[in-house]
Amino acid sequence: MLTPPKYWREIPQRYRLEAAKCAQCGKVFFPPRLICDACKGEEFETVVLPREGKIVSFTEVHTPASNFSDEAPFAVGIIDLGNELTILAQIVDCDPGEVKIGAPMRLEFRKLQKDGESGVLCYGYKAVPAR
Amino acid sequence: MEGIVGYGAYVPRNRIKVEEIAKVWGADAPSYKRGLMLEEKSVPSPDQDVITMSVEAARRAVLRAGINPKDIGAIYVGSESHPYAVKPSGTVVAEAIGATPDIHCADFEFACKAGSEGMFVAFGLVRAGLIKYGLGIGADTSQGAPGDALEYSASAGAAAYIFGKDDVIATVDASYSYMTDTPDFWRREYQFYPRHGGRFTGEPAYFKHVLGAARGILEQTGLTPKDFKYVTFHQPNGKFPLRAGAMLGFEKAKIEQGWLVPKLGNTYSGASPLGLSAILDVAKPGDRILMVSYGSGAGSDAFVFTATKRLADVQNMTFKTWDMLNNHKRYLEYGEYAKFRGKINKIQD
Amino acid sequence: MRDVAVIGVGIQTWGELWEKSLRDLFVESALNAMKDAGVDRIDSMYVGCMSSGLFTGQEHLASLLADYLGVNPAPAARVESACCSGGLAFRMGFMDVASGMSDIVLVGGVEKMTDVDGAAATYALATASDQEYEAYNGITFPGLYALIARAHMQKYGTTREQMAQVAVKNHENGSTNPHAQYPFKVTLEQVLNATMVADPIRLLDCSPITDGAAAAVLVPLEMAKKMSKGPVIKVAGSGHATDTIALHSRKDITFINSTAVAAEKAYKMAGVGPKDIDFAEVHDCFTIAEICVTEALGFFEKGRGGKAVEAGKTAIGGEIPVNPSGGLKAKGHPVGATGVAQIHEVVNQLRGACGKRQIKNAKRGLAQNMGGTGGSSLVHILEVV
């Protein structure tokens, strides 16, 4: 379900990888949250995640949900951005054999979804090989 | 003196060869390759459009400029394939690079000239002292109707230029524009593909305006082709820019670095801006560069740039244009290309 | 807190049940459970259902089902915790009886999944993942478990063959289960060469899309002793725990911590450990899930689950039989119903009523049900008293 407010609310994370760093213990959360699960602190500062990381695990999705039917098959992986921060992202633009655990990736701006032929276009990050 | 403080280019990795397209339409590939001087063209993936390519090119420009994006006062995205008919591309770029909300954004459209137009206005505002930095982008996921001559060339790419007053990598020494009402190529509202006037797009359209703008800026500056190290023109095919260069008296060697079209295709609004990016990738301090765009309808913008010492510091900071054209390419067959470009009728939700 | 017993269970044969609606499925299983229990009234009911809204457009489910079961105005609540909605409903019923609020409680689970096509069902199921940071990026549930599988293979050397063995074993078990959706055997080669779904997970590594319901009747243990004709089956332990629903937010994606914590609580309540369990029904939504779950339950050390299935330790007649019913794999996985159907199997095993797939001397069984990739887990231990 894609609606403009739901999409718009996440723009700082989807476009700019804005995360929240606990002012008390320094733990970083992506997306930001209101309370730190480590120290219960409620004060945060905005930090921007690095756009480079490494593949922790990956798969290639052959049977996607209805809103991704056109793009299958596509690779998805968990990307470790360092500092105990991991995100999930599609992995694109790889040559055969390039998708593997530990492979260096960087995040590029891509179109993630569209709401049918007339609805809103939704952008975000996908991982591409860092080379 | 005002000039370019940062630049960035982006080209998708997908390619399709002229032969692959010709095969489908029963056309003679060798004559197309010879006639248009085209080998292959870039193709956007379904997840790439003018907005995504503009954002990546803009990020690279910001990186090379080494500035705080909040200091960018205007972003102009020029394209004839903006993803939305109504809703700006520029605001997405502004948001993605962190330049909002103190900024002016507009989307430009002037066939293939929209990119240089964005550069022209961004530069103009900087020179007028209204903004500190201005970002102009030329980008297209060009449309060419299936089976039309344009299908062999219409490709995808983007280039972004940030203009400012200090720490420039190339000065803007002059600018000049030349335009008339000439209906050589157009796309009406609600039409998916553009139409064009065939051979009418040549002499009275491309050549008249490109030569007009080039001669105008040379006259204005008192410079001659001998004073330039590089020149880049709008490049709808391989032949037109070479011929325009020859008619103006530029040797082929000055054109080649920015002559991307045989490997890239025609990126419409991105074409001459991408040519310029390839030149900036290699230019040395003091090198003078002429850029002349062309947009149907019709008009040309011309710029004279001179590379500064700082250019050498930023050239290797991120991707270079010829590297993107030569490396990590993925060749598509026509079927996948048709799917990627939305040329296959499917059930609509 | 009162001791609680299960005195009746009900189910139907699962599958693509085109002629049966959501309410038909539930009422059929609920009536079977009430008849099995020998009760004609209930004090309250809990229904586990993941997504009647997306699958059939129906919300406000509990009251509708209470109406069609003919028990209005009895209180009825629908609970949701993705694929462990059924297990959660069972725990709610257990708590209701244990607290003394109700004496006879009906617990049910239901999912009607085939009113939408496969891609829409995949979409509905994907809502059990983090909508904004998992599903937004196109990942599916097979995809998420594929990420777990790949990491498990990398970390512990688990093999495709070991994963496939889970499917072979569970189809073997399910082949004699009259309620199973796919009561047939599969070979290792068939599993290894099945259609790719999300590399390295193939079609026969996945539980199917299923229509079905299951139900159980809970009463205080003292009441059960008077009512039961056969063995009295006590709910000895109940554990429930959560974890991040976003898989990528976990430190170790190969270990299902919510199951480990829920199991620890259930073992403690029952005063037993993993060695004291005679058999288990676990959440094998994908073959790798069963491997991870048998590790989290403490049946095997971390990383040894694959080797255990390969060695036959989890087969009927093995060290600790897992999924004698055929599991989600062969029996089917109508998501909201699965947790209650596990109870159905455990009760029938403890009654010695499972025919060819009966485990000898089964006195204490465990049911483990989880939501998503382990964002929630329920563990229940049932024993003959």
Image (cartoon, grey):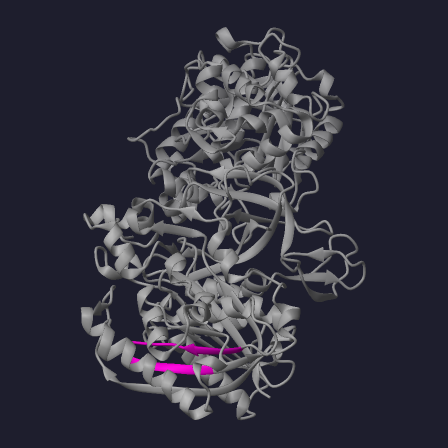
Q: Quadrant of the C terminus of chain C?
A: top right
Q: Is residue C344 visible?
A: yes
Who is closer to the viewer here, C39 or C296? C296
Q: How many marks on residues?
A: 0
Left or right of C367, for residue B191: left
Left or right of A110, for residue C293: right
Q: Main secondary structure of the magenta part?
A: strand
Q: Quadrant of the N terminus of chain C?
A: top right
Q: Quadrant of residue C88?
A: top right
Assess whether residue B300 is covered by the magenta stretch: yes
Q: Residue at x 30, y 62 (%)?
A: B143
Q: Is residue C1 visible?
A: no
Q: Is residue C355 above or below residue A16?
A: above
Who is closer to the viewer here, A26 or B148? B148
Q: Residue at x 54, y 13 (%)?
A: C229
Who is closer to the viewer here, C133 or B173? B173
Who is closer to the viewer here, C65 or A57? A57
Residue A81 drawn at (x, y percent): 67, 51
Q: Residue at x 34, y 40 (%)?
A: C116
Q: Is residue B55 above or below residue C124?
A: below
Q: Which residues are magenta?
A: B288-303
Residue C159 drawn at (x, y percent): 59, 22
Assess whether residue B316 is covered by the magenta stretch: no
Q: Residue at x 26, y 60 (%)?
A: B35
Q: Is residue C162 above or below residue A71?
A: above
Residue B120 drawn at (x, y percent): 45, 83
Residue B144 drawn at (x, y percent): 27, 61
